Image (cartoon, grey):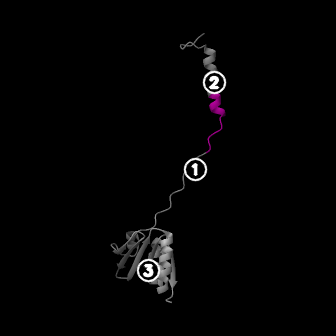
């Protein structure tokens, strides 16, 4: 007996059976893991300002490596700074801390104010409070 393509039926069945057996006995592909979530972007001036109760901080510096804004609310005054690199943030903090003060430090951002005001912002954005004494 022959199939409509001219191959003997036994050969067609053997090819189909071989394909089926190969599919069933081939090792399973390793499970793919979802790529880890990208790290959250550092907070921006507007997000930090909102956490401080200042919906529109007054931008003072808009440079390639940092942005700095002034934020005045009924509770008090804040200086908000964001950085493009961690190195830029470290350098800025090193210089700023020579003047003393309290700093809320996050991922490539800093808020300068009094410790009680920084606690309120920290509750919303996280970070750590650092204090420096004037030299």
Q: Are marks 3 and 1 in contact (CB under 8 Å)?
A: no
Q: Residues within 10 Å of mark 3 (few under 14, many from 20)?
A: many
Image location (x, y in percent) of residue 48: 41, 72
Give the residue number, with chain letter if any, for mark 2.
17
Can residue 104 be spotted in the picture? no
75 or 105, nearer to the observer: 105
Residue 83 x, y percent position in the rendering: 44, 70
The residue where tag 3 is placed is: 112
The one nearer the camera, 64 or 131, is: 64
Residue that badge 1 annotates: 33
What residue is shown at x 50% (from left), y 61% (from top)? 39
| Residue shown at the point (36%, 78%) measured from the top left | 70
Q: Which mark is residue 64?
A: none
Residue 23 within the magenta-colored segment of the rendering: yes
Q: CA distance from mark 3 to mark 2?
A: 74 Å
* Residue 38 visible from this viewpoint: yes
Magenta span contains residue 25: yes
Q: Nearer the N terminus, badge 1 or badge 2?
A: 2
Question: Can you tell which of label 3 and label 1 is closer to the viewer?
Answer: 3
x%, y% of residue 71? 36, 78
Residue 100: % across, % down:
48, 86
Name the foreground residue: 63 vs 126. Answer: 63
**Could you tell me which secondary element the residue under label 1 belongs to?**
loop
Asked whether disc 3 touches disc 2, contact meaning CB atoms under 8 Å apart, the reply is: no
How many circles with numbers are drawn on the protein? 3
């Amino acid at each position: 007996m022959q199939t409509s393509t001219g191959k003997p039926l036994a050969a067609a069945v053997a090819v189909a059976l071989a394909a089926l057996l190969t599919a069933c006995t081939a090792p399973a592909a390793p499970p793919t893991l979802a790529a880890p979530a990208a790290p959250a972007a550092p907070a921006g001036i507007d997000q930090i300002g909102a956490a401080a109760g200042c919906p529109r901080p007054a931008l003072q510096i808009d440079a390639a490596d940092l942005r700095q804004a002034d934020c005045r609310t009924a509770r008090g005054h804040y200086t908000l700074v964001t950085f493009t690199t961690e190195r830029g943030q470290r350098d800025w903090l090193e210089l700023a801390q020579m003047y003393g003060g309290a700093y809320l430090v996050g991922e490539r951002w800093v808020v300068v104010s009094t410790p009680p005001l920084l606690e309120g912002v920290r509750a919303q954005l996280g970070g750590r409070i650092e204090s420096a004494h004037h030299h």
